[in-house]
Amino acid sequence: MSVAEPRRIVLFRHAKADWPQVTDHERPLADRGRKDAAEAGRRLADTGIPFDLALCSTAVRTRETWKLAVQEFPQRPKTIYEERIYEASPGELIAVLNETPDDAQNVLLIGHNPGVQGLADILAGSAEEDARERMDRRGFPAATFAVLSFTGSWKSVEPGVATLEDYWAPAE
């Protein structure tokens, strides 16, 4: 594929987690989180984006979110569980995206706040329709995703490079 073709980054925050007596990294999904993860998977499948790669935090709640969401996809993309996504800042997430091979056109990143929301905010130099207004109003609650597009190589991902195409958050 040419680097002139638009690429998509979907930033997906893990679904609602439970608070049992375990380390933060080991927190599982709550019942509502399991329901919302499946719904987010259906909504992601409805976008029609053929994902080439999923980059998922190693935390239990992100792995469970991905496992439930991907069941709704027509085809499972290659998945890499990446430790650096856990508790990552927007800059650290950009560094992970910059390492993506250029043969991947559409990438889904499953991570945590505040990094995921911060990354959506700083990458989106522009937005389609009311996507930015909805994201600014709702924030990035659990199981939310933002679809961003850009042109260029993955090494060129930097603040302001993308267009916020879509935003979805579960009803609360």
Image: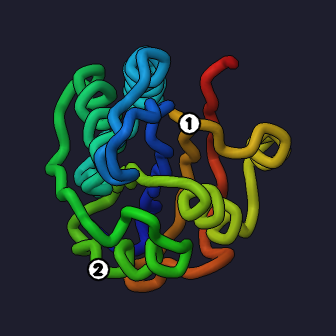
* Left or right side of 37 for 119: right
Identified by mark 2, the residue type is Glu
* Left or right side of 84 for 141: right
Quarter of the rendering occupied by the C terminus? top right
Q: Nearer the viewer, residue 34 or 122?
A: 34
Question: Can the viewer see residue 56?
Answer: no
Residue drawn at (21%, 67%) of the image: 103
Q: Nearer the viewer, residue 5 or 17?
A: 17
Residue drawn at (68%, 70%) of the image: 122
Q: Pinpoint residue 101: horizontal percent, then vertical percent.
A: 22, 74
Residue 99 in the image: above or below residue 18: below
Instruction: Give the number of the mark in front: 1 or 2.
Output: 1
Quarter of the rendering occupied by the N terminus? bottom left
The residue that mark 2 highlights is: 99
Quadrant of residue 17 in the image? top left
**N-term-proximal mark, 1 vs 2:** 2
Q: Indicate the colouring scheme.
A: rainbow
Identified by mark 1, the residue type is Ala
The residue that mark 1 highlights is: 142
Q: Pinpoint residue 136: horizontal percent, then vertical percent.
A: 81, 48
Residue 120 in the image: above or below residue 70: below
Residue drawn at (29%, 20%) of the image: 72
Q: Pinpoint residue 29: horizontal percent, then vertical percent.
A: 38, 29
Q: How would you rate the neighbour count of disc 1 (Cα within 10 Å): few for under 14, some for 14-19, many for 20 or more? A: some
Q: What is the spatial separation of the Cα atoms under label 1 and label 2, in whole angstroms?
A: 26 Å
